[in-house]
Amino acid sequence: MITKRIIPCLDVREGRVVKGVNFDQLQDVSSPIDLAAYYSEHGADELVFYDITASSDGRKLFTDILTETASKVFIPLTVGGGINTVEDFDRVLKCGADKVSVNSGAIRNPDLVEEAAKKYGDQCVVLSVDIKRVDGVFTVFAKGGRENTGMEAISWIKRCVDNGAGEVVVNSIDTDGVKQGFDLEMLDAVCNAVNVPVIASGGAGGIEDFITLFKTLPGVDAGLAASIFHFGTVDIKDLKQEMLRHNIPARIL
Amino acid sequence: MITIVDYSVGNLFSLVSSFKAIGCDVNVTGDPDAVKTADRIILPGVGAFRDAKEKLDESGLIDVLLEKASSGTPIMGVCLGMQMLFDKSYEYGAYDGLGLIEGEIRPISDFVPDGLKIPHMGWNALNFGEKKHPLFKYIKEGDDVYFVHSYSAVKCDKNIIATSEYGGLVTAAVAKDNILGCQFHPEKSGSVGLKILKAFTDF
């Protein structure tokens, strides 16, 4: 049985892990390399490194950190943030990333997903979407949730999957940082629309939110979160044990 | 010393790092003369079968690989590298593989039930069957490894050493004498994967 994946997300700026609550008020948490190794040893199934650096110096620092992490941590690594061209895919894949996540870059350049999927394979291209309800419509937001694109989210996701996105991260802006559980309604709509792995993001406040997620929506393949792992609110080992207790397939070390 | 065959397919970063992590020297090379003197060989590969086979053809490495295979050098294929060991692949056409292991590569969608997601991506448990192969001597049945694939080896029952459950049994690893193959990525399978690579260095 394929297991449900638990994925800590590390937002990295100037070489440090940060986590925004509703996308601002960033707080420094720890060293990305140390944190990645810690998570890998504690049962994380995959890691997401999100580069939120704006400067080119910061970008170089990010790829150095990525290289060092990938030479020490042997679980799949997904990299996102600042991915706008096929060259950006190349840059992070060379440093040890296994998958590359595109968000605003795909909105700016709708050919990006297709070009990257042709070059590196569908399995390498992860579509990440920030979604917020606007007048009851699931709407795609760009630039870290700051800009309303006016696009309806489900049709956007379908289009990108048709173009070769091999996995979809659904980040609900409505539930992000609120810690009251994942956005089950939004996730259900995405699961019904595509047949590639769907990763839930935004809203996990505790172990029970993951249990509810996987119990309610068997179509969801993975749960992603940041601060609850970084601050120790949820220990991944405990989470996995609780998943097994609820007959949710989980990988135990 | 492990020789990783570089024929310009995919990213060897993690494979190299994982052998280094278990204290093993690694030589990454596309030079047939260097492969000729190798004592253990890894054949990597990601992407589409046809492209990879074309590149292997162009590399001039096929003769030396076949020679090493028949002289008993341990050779392990990983992911697409494993698929290349087989007679034939039916990924976007029909293409000959190296013919070192009997069987063929077919789309997973041919034999898993509708509704299961393709690719088979994520962590899945290994089942060993009746006999545990030495490649798994440091791990136990039920340990999880990381898969990403849309095609799978079939008609190769007698050489299967591990399977995983995905709407049916999917070939996870094969072995025939000194020729081994993992469909999953040991270099992405955490400590379990490193233990499999370690066992390979003992061959």
Image: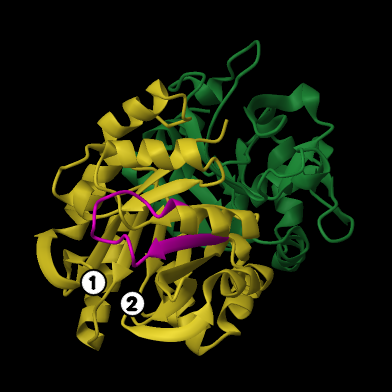
Mark 2 to mark 1 CA distance (whole Å)? 7 Å
Q: Nearer the viewer, residue B48 or A20?
A: A20
Mark 2 secondary-structure assignment: loop
| Residue at the outermost front position | A135
- Give the x, y percent position of residue A135: 44, 76
Instruction: Answer with left or right where residue A49 lies relative to residue B194.
Output: left
Q: Nearer the viewer, residue B67 or B99?
A: B99
Instruction: Answer with left or right where residue A138 lies relative to residue B179.
Output: left
Q: Nearer the viewer, residue B36 or B45?
A: B45
Q: Which residue is drawn at 51% across and 46% down?
A: A221
Instruction: Answer with left or right where residue A102 lies relative to residue B61.
Output: left
Q: Colour of chain A?
A: yellow
* Residues drawn in magenta: A167-184
Mark 2 is surrounded, within 10 Å at the Cα level, by few (under 14), some (14 to 19) or many (20 or more) other residues, namely some
- Figure check: A38 above or below A250: below
Disc assigned to residue A23: 1
Residue, disc 2: A145
Disc assigned to residue B151: none
Q: Which residue is drawn at 34% across and 31% down?
A: A240
Q: Residue at x 70, y 50 (%)?
A: B150
Q: Quadrant of residue A71?
A: bottom left
Q: Which of A228 and A64 is in front in this view?
A: A228
Q: How many dots with numbers?
A: 2
Q: Residue at x 24, y 52 (%)?
A: A179
Is residue A173 in the magenta section?
A: yes
Would you say the residues marked 2 and 1 are in contact, meaning their CB atoms lie under 8 Å apart? yes
Secondary structure mostly seen in the magenta stretch: loop
Chain in green (letter): B
Amino acid under disc 1: Phe
